[in-house]
Amino acid sequence: VQDRLRVTHIGSGAGIDVPVTISAGIATYPEHAAAVSELLAAATVTLRDAKASGGDTIRIDAPGETASPEDLRNFGVLRGLVTAIDTKDHYTKRHSEEVAYYAMAIAERLELDEEFVAAVLQAGLLHDIGKICIPDAILRKPAPLTDAEAQVVQQHVTVGDLIVGGLPDMEFVRAGVRHHHERWDGSGYPDGLRGDQIPRIARIVSVADSFSAMTTNRSYRIGLPVVEAVRRLEEAAGEQLDPDFVTAFVALVNER
C-alpha cells in the first residue's frame, strides 16, 4: 500500500501535483499486547515514532522498545476514565470528545509539535473527568444550577487535577484539566490566572470547551447555531478567551 501511494499524486486547483505519503504504526495480538487497549496503545506509540523519524515510513512495534509499560498502562487508564465518565453522564463524554476534536484541530492549525498536539487531545478528553465525583442530582439536573450547585461543579477542575496527576508524564494534560476554566481577564477559576499566566494547553481547551458547550443541546436549552456561537466566541476574545486561539478556531469553522 505504501509503495502504491508513493507513486500517487493529487492535483491541486493551481495545477500543482502533490505527492502522497503515509506513516503507519503496526502492532499485533498477542505478540505486542494482551488486551485491546494495550494493542491500540502500542500501535499509537509506534505511529508517533514513525512520524518523529521523518514520516513516510511504517514502523512495527517491538515489545519492550517502542511501547513502554507506562505508555500501555496510561492508555488503558485513560480509556477507563473516559468510560467511567460516560457511565455517569453521557453528555459529558460526548462533549469531551467534541472538545478533544476541536482543541486538536486548533493545535494542528497552529503547527504545534506532535507531542503537544497529543497532550491537547488527551486534555480535551479528560478536561471534565473530575465530574465523576459530582453528585448525580447536580450533574444531571434538567434546569440551570443554583449558585451553590455551581460552586460544587467548579470543584471538578481540582478533582480532575488530582486524578490526572496520579499518572506519570501527564504534566501538560494536567495543566489543561486544572486550568480550562481560567479566563483571559483573570475572572476564572480555580486560581484566578490571567493572560499568558494560563497554560497554553488550557487556553486552547477553553476555546474548544466554550464552542462545544454553546452548540450542544441540553435538557433545559437548545444549542446555539454555529454562526451565533462563533459571534459569541469573538465577543469573548480578549476578555474570557485567548484572542489568538479564538482567531485560529474561527478560521477553521469558516473554512468548513
Image: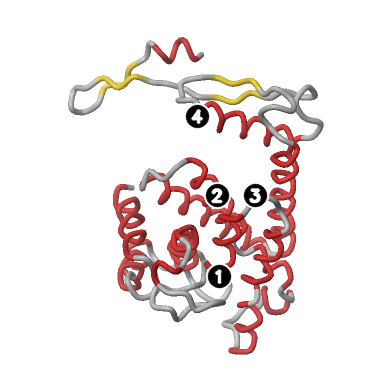
Q: Is residue 50 left or right of residue 228?
A: right
Q: Which residue is identified by label 4? A: 51
Give the residue at mark 3.
169
Which residue: 45% across, 59% down? 200
User: Of tags 2 and 1, which is closer to the observer?
Assistant: 2
Q: Residue at x 43, y 15 (%)?
A: 5
- Up the image or down, 185 lies above or below 217; here it is below
* The image quarter in which residue 160 lies: bottom right
Mark number for residue 119?
A: 2
Amino acid beneath label 3 = Asp
Q: Does the residue at mark 2 contact the one at mark 4 (Cβ under 8 Å)?
A: no
Q: Which residue is mark 1?
A: 218
How far apart are the alpha carbons under marks 2 and 4? 16 Å
Amino acid type, callout 4:
Lys
**Residue name at image x 43 percent, y 63 percent:** 207
Give the Cα separation between the discs numbered 2 and 1. 28 Å
Q: Is there CB contact under 8 Å for labels 1 and 3?
A: no
Inter-mark Cα distance, 1 to 3: 35 Å
The front one of 12 and 110 is 110
- Give the distance between the C-alpha atoms of the residues marked 4 and 1, in whole angstroms: 39 Å
